[in-house]
Image: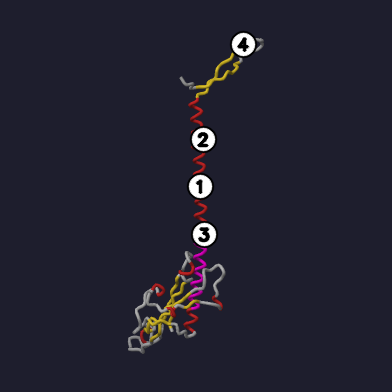
Amino acid sequence: MSRLSSCRDRELPDPRLAHSRTPPRRSAVCTSARERGVALVVALIILILVTLIGLAAVRGTTSQQRMSAYFYDRSVAFQSAEAGLAAGAEALAAGTTNIRNCGQGGEYCRSNPFSDPNLPTTAVVTVGGGSFTAAANATGQPQFVIELMGSYADPDSSTGFGQSANAAQYGAQGVSVTALYYRITARSGDPALIGDRAVVMLQAMYKQ
């Protein structure tokens, strides 16, 4: 038969023989081998739990660092796209010739010109130099596309379609005043060149 317990002798003092020279009695104190095995299992379980908590903390920290990097990258891309939009407005005011006709008599244009397969390569303008030079932390130079959306009535005119109930000529057939409307679409950079970095696209309508 296998031994299920281990014993060791322990001296037990006898209070009646406190002043006697008689040697104390000896008693066997037994420790079960099964109890020692349970303590080992409990220690292993605690070690596993501590390891799992540590791994969860490392994973959470890594996820927060990735989110912070993404928000920072998107903020830089947004500012770059705004610079591209401003550069497009400046080019429109200067009378640029890289304007795509999407108005009356023009071609059909998608809401996102950069995804339009019919967009001419010459219509995409990459901002370079001047006051719109991208910073070192940006993905690259922004781009913009200017499109002519057509000639429509000017709602800001004081005559014709712009009359209000307080106008002296309200109800009369006024002079129709029209204006040219342009759409400028800007993005922070070319996705084919910036890889997995954030890309932000902005659009604005301009009247001339």
Can you tell which quarter of the image residue 21 is in? top right
Can you tell which quarter of the image residue 167 is in? bottom left
Q: Residue flagged by tag 2: what amino acid is it? A: Ala
Name the N-terminal-most of marks 1 and 2.
2
The magenta span reads 66-87
Residues under labels 4 and 2: Cα distance? 43 Å
Q: Which mark is residue 68?
A: 3
Between 167 and 134, which is closer to the camera in this rendering? 134
Name the N-terminal-most of marks 1 and 3.
1
| Magenta stretch encompasses residue 21 | no
- The residue that label 1 is drawn on is 55
Residue 143 screen position, x and y as percent: 47, 75
Name the N-terminal-most of marks 3 and 2.
2
Between 28 and 155, which is closer to the camera in this rendering? 28
Residue 122 screen position, x and y as percent: 44, 80
Please state, as top left, top right, bottom left or bottom right, where the C terminus lies in the image.
Answer: bottom left
| Magenta stretch encompasses residue 75 | yes
